[in-house]
Image (cartoon, rainbow, N blue to C red):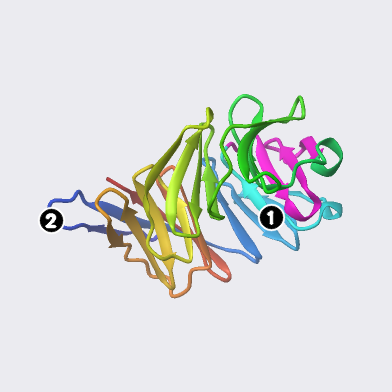
């Protein structure tokens, strides 16, 4: 295995270490991410694929239309959001369907714009009709709004069990906890795609450059990657996966 190691940083700042681990060929249309068990998740012809060197699985439900979002927060309980059909599907680690909700039938008053996993049998759900963020209990099929009306349109979201993050059209980053308390985290530089690493750090891609941005210090450090094209990326458990047009390249990335 080829291993390249980089260590870099500025004075008065802790170093970031980056080491190339491996690469894998793929014919994916889009890359969803990688879990802690070494499985890659991607979409090909609107079919979700889960793949490692030893095992391949897939989930297909073409009747629900395009897969808008794949939430890998919990590899034992994946969330697929089908925005066009107002539907969400939960899958177990074998990609078996455990929950399927058609909001047009179960909750016709809702117009989900973003749906992802929260805690305690709930989903984060942003309702376009009311412009409110809330928690949807997928066992009871009930929605509980937890915020006031959002005044600025959302352009990017991310979440974990306890927090829902979003960036508005003014490139301001906010976070809400499960009780609806909202905090402003900072302003975000121009980007093409991004991932929130923590409440203080973001990974930002612009062109062929991927950088780590410190919200508090408002400083960026460019990662010295070898890829000449980056379709998308995913960071988890200190593994940075870069998706090019035909390859997934993995790095060990340790942030301060």
The residue at the far left in this view is: 11
Image-based side of 41 in relation to 170, left or right: right
Q: Where does the magenta region start and end? A: 74-101
Q: Is residue 87 magenta?
A: yes
Give yes or no for contact between labels 1 and 2 (Cβ–Cβ under 8 Å).
Answer: no
Split into 4 quadrants, where in the image is the N terminus? Answer: bottom left
- Give the quarter of the image for residue 26: bottom right
Q: Is residue 137 above or below residue 247?
A: above
Across and down, in percent, residue 221 comes to 28, 60
Q: Nearer the viewer, residue 111 or 247?
A: 111
Q: Name the residue under label 1.
A: 68
Few, some or many residues within 10 Å of mark 1 (<14, 14–19, 20+): some
Viewer can see residue 76? no
Across and down, in percent, residue 126 comes to 63, 43
Across and down, in percent, residue 152 comes to 53, 53
Split into 4 quadrants, where in the image is the C terminus? Answer: top left
- Element carrying mark 1: loop
Q: Which of 126 and 198 is in front in this view?
A: 126
- Element carrying mark 2: loop
Q: Mark 2 points at which residue?
A: 11
Viewer can see residue 184? yes
Residue positioned 52% across, 63% down in the render = 232
Which circle, 1 or 2, is nearer the viewer?
1
Across and down, in percent, residue 180 comes to 52, 32
């Amino acid at each position: 295995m080829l291993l390249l190691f980089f260590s870099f940083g500025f004075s008065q700042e802790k170093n970031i270490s980056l080491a190339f681990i491996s690469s894998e060929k793929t014919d994916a249309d889009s890359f969803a991410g990688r879990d802690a068990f070494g499985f890659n998740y991607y979409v090909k012809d609107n079919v979700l694929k889960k793949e490692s060197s030893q095992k391949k699985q897939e989930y297909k439900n073409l009747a629900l239309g395009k897969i808008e979002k794949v939430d890998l927060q919990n590899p034992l309980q994946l969330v697929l959001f089908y925005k066009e059909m107002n539907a969400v599907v939960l899958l177990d680690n074998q990609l078996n369907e455990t929950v399927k909700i058609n909001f047009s039938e179960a909750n016709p008053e809702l117009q989900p714009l973003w749906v992802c996993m929260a805690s305690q049998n709930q989903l984060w759900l942003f309702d376009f009709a009311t412009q409110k963020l809330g928690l949807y209990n997928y066992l009871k099929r009930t929605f509980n709004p937890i915020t006031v009306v959002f005044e600025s349109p959302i352009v990017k979201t991310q979440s974990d069990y306890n927090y829902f993050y979003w960036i508005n059209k003014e490139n301001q980053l906010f976070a809400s906890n499960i009780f609806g308390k909202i905090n402003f985290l900072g302003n975000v530089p121009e980007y093409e795609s991004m991932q929130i690493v923590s409440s203080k750090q973001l990974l930002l891609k612009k062109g062929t450059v991927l950088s780590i941005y410190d919200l508090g210090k408002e400083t960026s450090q460019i990662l010295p990657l070898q890829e000449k094209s980056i379709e998308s990326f995913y960071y988890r458990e200190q593994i940075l996966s870069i998706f090019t047009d035909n390859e997934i390249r993995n790095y060990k990335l340790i942030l301060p």
